[in-house]
Image (cartoon, rainbow, N blue to C red):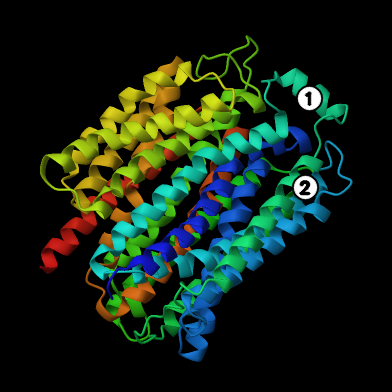
Amino acid sequence: MKENKNYNQALSTLVTVFFFWGFIAASNGVFIPFCKTYFQIDQFQSQLVDFAFYGAYYFGALILFILSNSKGKDIMNMWGYKNGIIYGLLLSCLGAVAMYPAVLGANPGDSDVFYYVLGALFIVGLGFSLQQTAANPFAVSLGAPEKGAHRLNLAGGVNSLGTTIGPIVVALILFGTTPKSGSELNEMITNGEISLSTIQMLYIAVGGLFLAAAALFYFSKKLPQAKDNSQFLKAPKAQKALLFMTIVLVGCFYLIFDQYRGEPNNDTILNLTLLSLITVIGTLLISNKLAKQDKDSWGAMQYPQLVLGMLAIFTYVGVEVTIQSNLGELLKVNLGNGLNPIGLPSMSDSEIAPLISMYWGGLMIGRWAGAIAVFNPVGKLKTWLYILVPYVAFGVVLFVNFISGFDVSTLFWFVICVGIQIVGFFAGKEKPALTLKIFGFLGIAAMLVGLFTTGNIALFAFLSGGLFCSIMWPSIFALSIQGLGKYTSQGSSFLVMMILGGAIIPPLQGKLADIMDIHSSYWIAVICFVYLAFFAHRVGNILNNKQ
């Protein structure tokens, strides 16, 4: 398939979908602390926003796999990637519109309404699951196969632009252009000056954009349907393992939600959340062990690099999301002396938006650098682009915050973190295992600095988590599917399911924050980065031994 003008235009249309994903996902970083304040809920409950949103990814991918497995045909391939994206956009539109009745008539402290919000977000996430399942292979199909990864990096860069803008836009809609203290916000919420009607209007607008994008895809004659002609391979034993895991997860979170009908027991909730985590890890590792004994009917799960990669995607999405989802609370907490746990002045919901934007901007910086190869630079030009593009992306983050009226002077010193990321990028030598290992260790170091220092050093350390996560997804994906042969497509589907990590790890950290303190809860992020570094080392050895 040759690249041509039509396909370039098609790619331009496609990246709008990637922008939506980033915009909505990142805006949760502002929405979560607002929900905690408005609904008067604990930190664990606030993290259920991530549970609903990212859990939907898992359920959407699982349903597609089960349907395909029962029919012996890839459902998404039967639809065509274009139609898959359209169906996903319409489903997300339904979820966005559902937000209106979900919060209708809600009052501050009305925690029951919060669960209706979670339901609407779950539907939006289901739509995103369909879109993501279709959009990634669709992007690969729009041109030469060898440049497919570069097109995905380009789309990822646009996605990250959405993550940078999302928190700023949502903060402006909720709180206006003037930063407000915590007491001012509470008073405005009590007086009805800040209400969920703004959220209603925001999601109605978002729903309209989803509908417009669906129409754009449907009526565009320059967008091919695109299908994968590879054979769908059944994996009934893998299906049974995933269904068992799902039943346990549903049971755990049913009991957790039931706890909040009365006086919640922190230990019970923590134990159930840990059980859900152990279930995911145990199911995947035991499945791979059984598959080694008898490969029949296990499909891609017979490959250790794939199973370890599923756990790596689970961990990566979990740590990427949990750092920023709990960051608002870390910055808001007042220890009684006007300072938060890292020794900076305690902030309000309206003051954290630039920092959430900077965190997600870190992912944009890395992904823009990863997209450079799309333009085929060579020699010194390539080297200079890898140095300059991250700083250009950093400048975009500062500019977006500046024109929004936020003080960006605090963010200037983040330029040092960007420099460390560039050094790590060159040290990785474009080798997935080495790159992932380096950035895994950088993530460990950043979280430890955040835990053992105070002030802006600690703040920038936590914010740099976004920088060091930025290149992990393509590295994990490349290592996990290497050597899968005819099971490559199925393995990719299993990896997408593991976005589930964003649904479990943030609530786990949230409950640890409720029991201990929000600062100490960031040891969760350290453990996650340790596993990612281990994965890079272990799978690198597995693949080298097979060559």
280 and 160: which one is in front?
160
Whether 458 is drawn above or below 542: the answer is: above
Label 2: element kind: helix
Quadrant (top left/top right/bottom left/bottom right) for the C terminus: bottom left
Residue sitting at 36 percent across and 85 percent down?
Answer: 229
Question: Contact, CB < 8 Å: mark 2 with mark 1?
Answer: no
Residue sitting at 70 percent across and 20 percent down?
Answer: 180
Query: Residue 7: which quarter of the image?
Result: bottom left
Q: Which residue is mark 2?
A: 200
283 and 368: which one is in front?
368
Residue sitting at 23 percent across and 58 percent down?
Answer: 539
Q: Amino acid at mark 1?
A: Asn
Which circle, 2 or 1, is nearer the viewer?
2
* Residue 307 in view (yes/no): yes
Quadrant (top left/top right/bottom left/bottom right) for the N terminus: bottom left
Whether 130 is drawn above or below 419: the answer is: below
Label at residue 186: 1
Q: Position of residue 545 (x, y in %)?
A: 12, 64
Q: Position of residue 34 (x, y in %)?
A: 69, 35
Label at residue 210: none
Q: Residues within 10 Å of mark 1 (few under 14, many from 20)?
A: some
Q: Residues within 10 Å of mark 2 (few under 14, many from 20)?
A: many
* Residue 262 in view (yes/no): no
Q: Residue most toward the top?
A: 337
288 and 127: which one is in front?
127
Q: Amino acid at mark 2?
A: Gln
289 and 324: which one is in front?
324
Mark 2 → mark 1, Cα distance in angstroms: 20 Å
